Image (tube, rainbow, N blue to C red):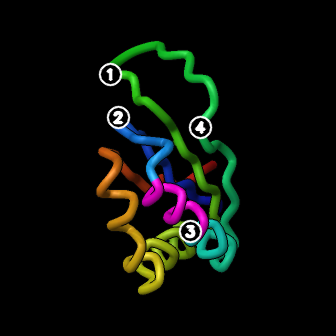
C-alpha cells in the first residue's frame, strides 16, 4: 500500500541557500527509497483551517520505505538545513 510523506510548511524562505542545498541532497535520497514527489509547491486553494505557505507530498511504495527515508543517516544529516529556514508539520499517511 503506498504511503505519503506530507509536509505543510507555514514559514519558509524559498530563496535561502540552506533550502536549496537541502533540496539538492534530498531528491536522490527520496529516489533511493522508491519515492517520488507528487506535489512540490504549487498554487494552494485554501478551504479551511490555517493555510500553509507551501505543501510537499512524496509518494513511497509503503510506510516502511517512507520511514526508512526519514531515518536514513544521510537524511538525518541534512534535516537541519530545512529546519533552519522553515517551520513545518510532517506526517506519513498510508494511502488507499
In the displayed structure, 9 sits above or below 49; it is: below
Task: Tell me the number on the disc at residue 41.
Answer: 4
**Label 2 neighbourhood size at 10 Å, few (<14), some (14-19), many (20+)?**
some
Residue 2, position as x, y percentages in the image = 64, 60
Q: CA distance from mark 3 to mark 4?
A: 15 Å
Determine if the magenta segment contains residue 19. Answer: yes
Pointer 3 residue: 26
Q: CA distance from mark 2 to mark 3?
A: 20 Å
Pointer 1 residue: 50
Determine if the magenta segment contains residue 63. Answer: no
Q: Earlier in the sequence, mark 2 or mark 4?
A: 2
Q: Are marks 2 and 4 in contact (CB under 8 Å)?
A: no
Chain part drawn in magenta: 17-24
Q: Which image quadrant is residue 8 in?
A: top left
Q: Earlier in the sequence, mark 1 or mark 2?
A: 2
Task: Tell me the number on the disc at residue 10.
Answer: 2
Amino acid at each position: 500500500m503506498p504511503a505519503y510523506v506530507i509536509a505543510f510548511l507555514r514559514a519558509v524562505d524559498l530563496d535561502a541557500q540552506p533550502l536549496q542545498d537541502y533540496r539538492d541532497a534530498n531528491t536522490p535520497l527520496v529516489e533511493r527509497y522508491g519515492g517520488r514527489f507528487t506535489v512540490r509547491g504549487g498554487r494552494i486553494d485554501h478551504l479551511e483551517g490555517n493555510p500553509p505557505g507551501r505543501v510537499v507530498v512524496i509518494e513511497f511504495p509503503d510506510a516502511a520505505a517512507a520511514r526508512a527515508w526519514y531515518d536514513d543517516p544521510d537524511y538525518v544529516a541534512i534535516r537541519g538545513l530545512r529546519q533552519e529556514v522553515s517551520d513545518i508539520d510532517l506526517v506519513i499517511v498510508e494511502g488507499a
